[in-house]
Amino acid sequence: MIRIVTAARLAALHAEVDDANDLARQAREDVAEQWTARLAASRELIEERKALTGVAHTAIVQAEEARRQAVQLRQAFTAALLAIARQQHYIGELERQLAAARTAPSWLYLLRKYGEPHSLHPTSEAAKEHAATCGAARTGWTSSDLPAAEVAWRVEAVAVVPEHEEGAPRSDAA
């Protein structure tokens, strides 16, 4: 089955990558802010430790919490970077599919279920195989004079006409 990727879908994926980049940038800024705040707190605790040994224990506990949060933020940042990389890979795949779709064949085969469009396929056999995976019989396909809404599965050949060509597209029932 041919899957056509629209420019709108591609634009939506680009927007998702931009959103992921914004989240990663915000995560980096949050890490820097929290790290700076934790460093300042640690310096104050070190000065108090010189005066009181009881405050030293509190400083160690707070420093461990800061480290744990820094690890969590670092993990979130790494996850955001991985998401960006996956989205970029996915966009590359979609761009290749879009380029392949631009060189579409002159005929596609429309699979209908009770007269309603179900899916498009590069060959009639591919359409029938797909219908079989959806519960249709693998054999016994014949043409029918019944109205489309009364036939469970039907394959129609549809001419692919570039937009710049005029005239109605031709359709042959199979």
Image (cartoon, helix red, strand yellow):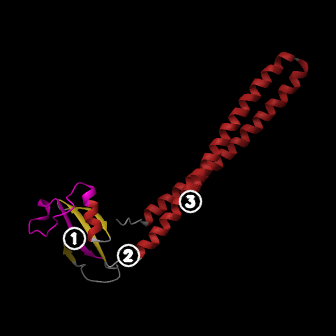
* Residue designated by label 3: 88
For marks 1 and 3, give the CA distance. Answer: 37 Å
Q: Which residue is mark 1?
A: 156
Kindly indicate the quadrant of the structure image that contains residue 33.
top right
Residue 108 image point, x, y percent: 30, 73
Residue 77 position by quadrant: top right
> Which of the two labelled residues, at mark 2 and mark 1, occupies the earlier sequence position?
2
Horizontal side of residue 163 vs 42, given as left or right? left
Give x and y (percent) for residue 24.
63, 49
Q: Look at the numbered disc 2 and give the secondary structure of its residue.
A: loop
- Magenta residues span 131-159
Secondary structure under badge 3? Answer: helix
Assign the N terminus to one quadrant of the image.
bottom left
Give the residue at x 80% y 20%.
57
Report how many numbered discs are placed on residues in the image. Answer: 3
Judging by the rendered image, the residue that carries numbered circle 2 is 104
